[in-house]
Image: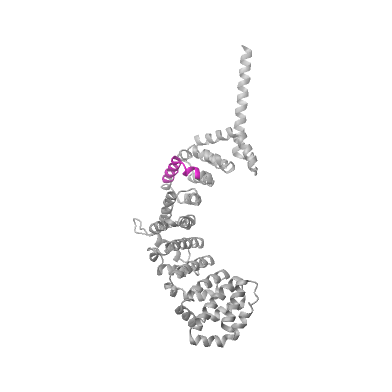
């Protein structure tokens, strides 16, 4: 009998030691994560996960059943270190139920969801399963009404991760776009950058839904405020964030691009939009390039609004940086095709002299080629007008000398264009 008691005591002690070792494993696993934090090769991580599969799953289950902020931090650490299959495991074990517990820091909850969904396989898994999709939607609906200002940055980071994923279905993204429109109306400064980044991405990603985007932007809310008007107002303000302006201009670019030949195009491209683009020519180099590219697209379709920015183009051609000058020269190519615009630029600004002066500076190959194209158009226009034919004859020697510098240019396009201009206009 005593032998049995001794044996059972020994078994009990063994079990206690085993439990203590497991506790120690858990403690080290969460405090330092030394076991895998330095594993850089996938094979090592796979071996580790195979070896400690039961312990890892037990620790995840323990956290899911005992939610508090400290355990959430530990779970985030696990997700960051382990492979995506454990992120799927966490999703499958209804992480949303855990996150709904009172007292949890919402930023920790959102941080966890960001870390889970940064893996494409996880997003694919969620949206390929109706139950998982409904759980995510219900959770987002739940927290959207409880967001404070300090939560909005991570909330929109999570939305951005979902929006960027190739596995997020369009019906879900439509809802994200509508939320973005509401945020434009509210114009919360702390989240502006995050949600504004989503707008151009969605418009480019699903161009077939362009009319939906426009209708959403142009629809008034209960206070009769429209996201589109709020967007334009933001772009008019001199102190608006440059990055945000750049992204909004990109969103407008895609919107206009996919609206060409559509009925609602004329409601997007208006004199108010021209004023916005004009003001953003001077805001920053980034917005200047973005605005010029948008103007290029608009003028290719219709040059009605050229009168709004002709002075600005000439002014910026003199003072802006190289990339900006190149974009303006490309825009001038369109403008100079029309006789009335050429006459205006020639009479007010002596545009041909300006172009030859830029070419003479030999700033860059790209700049030279863009300038030569504008010179070619200007010379063609001059040959159709008597007084400018005489003007070319008077300046012939100067213009010819400048062109001859590029006859042997290493760039074939520059060389061929130069040879053509010399042959067509300056060889008797």
Q: Is residue 2 left or right of residue 193?
A: right
Q: Residue at x 53, y 76 (%)?
A: 374
Q: Nearer the viewer, residue 22 or 400?
A: 400
In the picture shown, does residue 139 fall above or below 181? Answer: above
Quadrant, the N terminus? top right
In the picture shown, does residue 224 fall above or below 115? Answer: below
Percent x, y for residue 390? 52, 88
Percent x, y for residue 67? 50, 37
Q: Nearer the viewer, residue 57 or 325?
A: 325
- Can residue 364 be seen at all in this image of the molecule? no
In the rendered image, residue 283 lying in the magenta stretch gets the answer no
Quadrant of the rendered structure where residue 405 is?
Answer: bottom right
Q: Residue at x 50, y 50 (%)?
A: 166
Percent x, y for residue 371? 56, 75
Q: Nearer the viewer, residue 210 or 107?
A: 210
Q: Nearer the viewer, residue 3 or 417?
A: 417
In the rendered image, residue 141 lying in the magenta stretch gets the answer yes
Q: Residue at x 61, y 18 (%)?
A: 8
Quadrant, the C terminus? bottom right
Seen as rendered, the residue at the extreme top is: 1
Q: Of helix, strand and loop, which mostly describes the magenta segment? A: helix
Q: Is residue 26 left or right of residue 96?
A: right
Q: Residue at x 40, y 68 (%)?
A: 270
Percent x, y for residue 9? 61, 19
User: Is the image coloured rainbow, by chain, by secondary structure, or in one colour?
Assistant: one colour
In the picture shown, does residue 197 fall above or below 389? Answer: above
Residues rendered magenta in the picture: 124-142
- Can residue 404 be seen at all in this image of the molecule? yes
Quadrant of the rendered structure where residue 230 is?
Answer: bottom left
In the picture shown, does residue 175 fall above or below 276? Answer: above
| Number of numbered discs | 0
């Amino acid at each position: 009998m005593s032998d049995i008691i001794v044996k059972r005591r020994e078994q009990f002690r063994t079990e206690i030691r085993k439990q203590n070792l497991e506790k120690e494993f858990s403690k080290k696993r969460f405090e330092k994560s030394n076991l895998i934090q330095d594993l850089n090769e996938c094979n090592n991580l796979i071996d580790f996960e195979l070896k400690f599969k039961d312990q890892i799953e037990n620790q995840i289950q323990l956290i899911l059943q005992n939610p508090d902020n400290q355990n959430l931090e530990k779970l985030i650490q696990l997700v960051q270190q382990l492979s995506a299959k454990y992120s799927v495991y966490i999703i499958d074990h209804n992480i949303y139920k855990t996150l709904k517990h009172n007292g949890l820091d919402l930023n920790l909850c959102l941080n966890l969801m960001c870390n889970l969904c940064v893996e494409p396989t996880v997003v694919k898994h969620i949206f390929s399963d109706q139950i998982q999709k409904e759980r995510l939607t219900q959770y987002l609906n739940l927290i959207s009404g409880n967001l404070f200002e300090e939560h909005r940055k991570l909330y929109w980071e999570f939305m951005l991760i979902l929006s960027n994923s190739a596995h997020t279905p369009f019906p879900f993204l439509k809802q994200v776009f509508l939320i973005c429109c509401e945020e434009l109306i509210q114009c919360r400064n702390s989240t502006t950058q995050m949600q504004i980044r989503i707008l151009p991405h969605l418009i480019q990603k699903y161009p077939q839904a362009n009319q939906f985007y426009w209708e959403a932007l142009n629809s008034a809310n209960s206070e009769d405020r429209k996201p589109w008007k709020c967007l334009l107002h933001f772009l008019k303000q001199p102190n608006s964030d440059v990055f945000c302006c750049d992204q909004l201009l990109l969103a407008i670019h895609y919107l206009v691009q996919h609206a060409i030949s559509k009925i609602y195009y004329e409601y997007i491209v208006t004199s108010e939009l021209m004023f916005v683009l004009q003001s953003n020519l001077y805001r920053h180099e980034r917005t200047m390039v973005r605005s010029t590219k948008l103007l290029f697209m608009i003028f290719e379709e219709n040059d009605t609004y050229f009168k709004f920015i002709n002075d600005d183009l000439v002014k910026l051609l003199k003072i802006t940086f190289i990339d900006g000058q190149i974009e303006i020269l490309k825009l001038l190519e369109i403008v100079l095709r029309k006789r009335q615009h050429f006459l205006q630029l020639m009479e007010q600004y002596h545009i041909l002299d300006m172009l030859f002066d830029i070419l003479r500076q030999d700033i860059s190959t790209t700049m030279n080629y863009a300038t030569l194209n504008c010179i070619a158009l200007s010379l063609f226009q001059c040959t159709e007008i008597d007084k400018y034919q005489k003007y070319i004859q008077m300046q012939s020697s100067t213009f010819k000398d400048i062109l001859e510098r590029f006859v042997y240019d290493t760039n074939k396009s520059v060389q061929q264009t130069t040879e053509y201009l010399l042959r067509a206009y300056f060889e008797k």
